[in-house]
């Protein structure tokens, strides 16, 4: 089913001719008599009548507008600008979210690769040495300055081999 946007603008063309010019003159005189009504209101009323819609189904007429027609046009233009800004904002934020998700996925892959390397190195070392490199690697992933200070304090050969892999990342 066709979805209408919040505001739909349709145009009416009055051709140069006796019938259209007299109709336009009647519309103008009717709108002069009731300045609270707009051409849009008049067209809607005519459509409701010509389509034989019962009055119980028709929407209630709008209360008299206190704003001038120029202000209504400005409000419509502002609403259009706001909708355009919202659309651009949501597109930009959606793009940023996709970039963050992509970076998280890359980071997850790197952590997985690092865990595989740590497991590979730890299988070659004794059970006591296995716990120390894992803790050092975790510290390195969370803070590079902290891991650098720890690795400079301890001269464990396993840690020095792991640090070569970490420097590649």
Image (cartoon, rainbow, N blue to C red):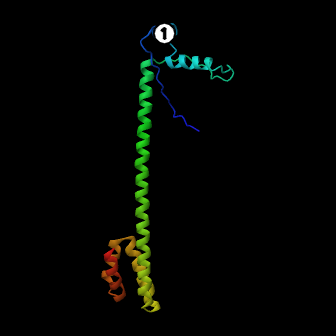
Identify the secondary structure beneath mark 1: helix
Q: Nearer the viewer, residue 4 or 109?
A: 4
Q: Quadrant of residue 57?
A: top right
The total number of labels drawn is: 1
Neighbours of disc 1 within 10 Å: few (<14), some (14-19), many (20+): few
Residue at 51% in and 8% down? 30
Horizontal arrangement in the rendering, residue 94 relative to residue 152 (left or right): right
Quarter of the picture containing the C terminus is bottom left
Residue tagged 1: 19
Horizontal arrangement in the rendering, residue 82 relative to residue 51 (left or right): left
Where residue 115 appears, as percent x and y from the top left, is 44, 78
Where residue 149 appears, as percent x and y from the top left, is 32, 77
Where residue 74 appears, as percent x and y from the top left, is 41, 25
Q: Is residue 7 above or below residue 149?
A: above
Residue at 41% in and 52% down? 95
Q: Is residue 136 above or below residue 103?
A: below
Residue at 44% in and 75% down? 112
Q: Nearer the viewer, residue 127 or 74?
A: 74
Q: Is residue 19 above or below residue 74?
A: above
């Amino acid at each position: 089913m066709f979805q209408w946007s919040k505001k739909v603008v349709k145009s009416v063309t009055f051709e140069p001719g006796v019938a259209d010019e007299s109709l336009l003159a009647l519309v103008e005189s009717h709108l002069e008599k009731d300045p609270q009504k707009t051409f849009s209101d008049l067209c809607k009323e005519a459509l409701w009548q010509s389509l034989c819609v019962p009055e119980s189904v028709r929407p209630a007429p709008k209360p008299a507008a206190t704003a001038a027609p120029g202000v209504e046009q400005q409000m419509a233009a502002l609403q259009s600008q706001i909708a355009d800004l919202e659309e651009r904002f949501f597109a930009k934020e959606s793009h940023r979210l996709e970039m963050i998700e992509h970076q998280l996925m890359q980071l997850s892959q790197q952590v997985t690769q690092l865990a595989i390397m740590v497991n590979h190195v730890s299988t070659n070392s004794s059970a006591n040495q296995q716990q120390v490199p894992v803790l050092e690697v975790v510290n390195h992933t969370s803070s590079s300055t902290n891991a650098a200070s720890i690795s400079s304090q301890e001269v464990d050969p396993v840690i020095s081999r792991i640090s070569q892999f970490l420097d590649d990342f």
